[in-house]
Image (cartoon, grey):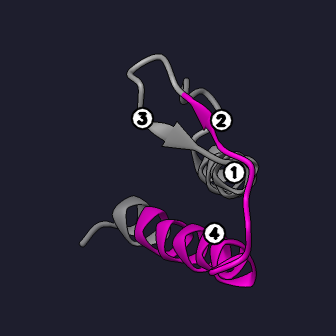
Amino acid sequence: MTKTNSKFKKITIQAVKEAGKILKQHFKKPLQTSLKKDSSLVTPIDFEAEKVIIKLIKKISPLMIF
């Protein structure tokens, strides 16, 4: 594994763990939901977790577009 791949893997694992902590804090709690364009449900917690993931991935790939 190259150094870049190793770093990306490390950041990806960190992002998933941090997002998981956010989701776990709100597990089985009542949530407000809304519909995305594709008619799937989304919550404010989903957006919060997504922000953490994007922030960490942009640390190693700042030009990545989401």
Is residue 37 toward the left or the right of residue 22 in the image? left
Residue at mark 3 to residue at mark 2: CA–CA distance? 29 Å
Q: Position of residue 21 (x, y in %)?
A: 68, 81
* Amino acid marked by disc 1: Lys
The image quarter in which residue 11 lies: bottom right
Residue at mark 3 to residue at mark 4: CA–CA distance? 20 Å
Q: Which residue is mark 2?
A: 62
Label located before the other in sequence (4 or 1): 4
In-front residue for pair 32/18: 32
Q: Which residue is mark 4?
A: 19
Q: Which residue is mark 1?
A: 59
Label 2 crowd bin: few (<14), some (14–19), many (20+), radius 10 Å: few
* SS at mark 2 in the image: loop
* SS at mark 4 in the image: helix
Label 4 crowd bin: few (<14), some (14–19), many (20+), radius 10 Å: many
Residue at mark 2 to residue at mark 1: CA–CA distance? 6 Å
Mark 4 or 1: the one toward you: 4
Label located before the other in sequence (1 or 3): 3
* Amino acid marked by disc 4: Ala
The image quarter in which residue 1 lies: bottom left
Label 3 crowd bin: few (<14), some (14–19), many (20+), radius 10 Å: few
Circles 2 and 1: CB distance less than 8 Å? yes
